[in-house]
Image: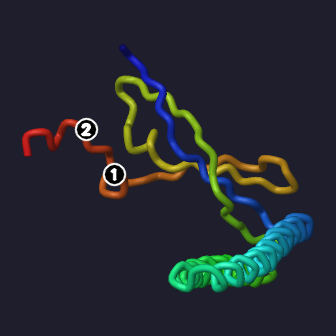
Amino acid sequence: MDSLTLRHDVALVFIVTEELKAHLLAEVTATADEVQRQIEQFDFRARQALAELQRTDLNRAMAARQQIETEKRRLEAIKNELAERRTEVEGLEIGAEYQRGGIEGQVEIKVGDNIFEKLAGVQVVVKDSKVVEIRQQHLQPGEIFLPVPRNAHAGE
């Protein structure tokens, strides 16, 4: 075998434009609104369930109240995280680069290739929904972590 195709992560980097900023703000706002609706629905259903449990079983009502408080804190944490993200998006400067997730790509390696160059990160730079640049990062041997074979620890 002289070559092999491997999977690796490809970072998506967006050039901030007014359109992208508006899209990101709309996305964060819609998600925050949905979380707020979930909080309100959860609160309503929780109050009804607690009222019923308090009439029938106080011990279960106390346990349920703890679970409800835990879930409320989780939803509030999500809401706060979205508020922070909104602030971050509002602060983006037009023309700046904004890394937003990634996709899986493939790379073909052949006998004789420099493994560090082949496995270095790749970035796809996008502006107004169009790819404007594909960047190959250059890593030194100490900057890349090669996977440990699955059976490497079998003798331990």
Label 1: which secondary element: loop
Label 2: which secondary element: loop
Disc with the residue nearer the chain's start (2 vs 1): 1
Q: Position of residue 50 (x, y in %)?
A: 67, 82
In the picture, which quadrant includes the N terminus?
A: top left
**In the picture shown, does residue 98 fall above or below 140?**
below
Residue name at image x 70 percent, y 67 percent: 98
Residue 92 makes an appearance in the image: no
Q: Nearer the viewer, residue 81 or 110?
A: 81
Q: Position of residue 83 (x, y in %)?
A: 74, 83
Residue name at image x 91 percent, y 65 percent: 19
* Mark carried by residue 150: 2
Front disc: 2 or 1: 2
The type of residue carrying mark 1 is: Phe
Q: Which residue is mark 1?
A: 145
Q: Nearer the viewer, residue 54 or 99?
A: 54
Which of the 4 quarters of the picture holds residue 45? Answer: bottom right
Q: Position of residue 118 (x, y in %)?
A: 45, 39
Compared across the picture, whether 60 is left or right of 84 comes to: left
Compared across the picture, whether 26 is left or right of 121 comes to: right
Q: Nearer the viewer, residue 149 or 11?
A: 149
The type of residue carrying mark 2 is: Arg
Q: Residues under labels 2 and 1: Cα distance? A: 15 Å
The residue carrying pointer 2 sits among few (fewer than 14), some (14 to 19) or many (20 or more) residues within 10 Å by Cα, namely few
Which of the 4 quarters of the picture holds residue 56? Answer: bottom right
**In the picture shown, does residue 76 fall above or below 119?**
below
The residue carrying pointer 1 sits among few (fewer than 14), some (14 to 19) or many (20 or more) residues within 10 Å by Cα, namely few
**In the picture shown, does residue 12 fall above or below 79?**
above
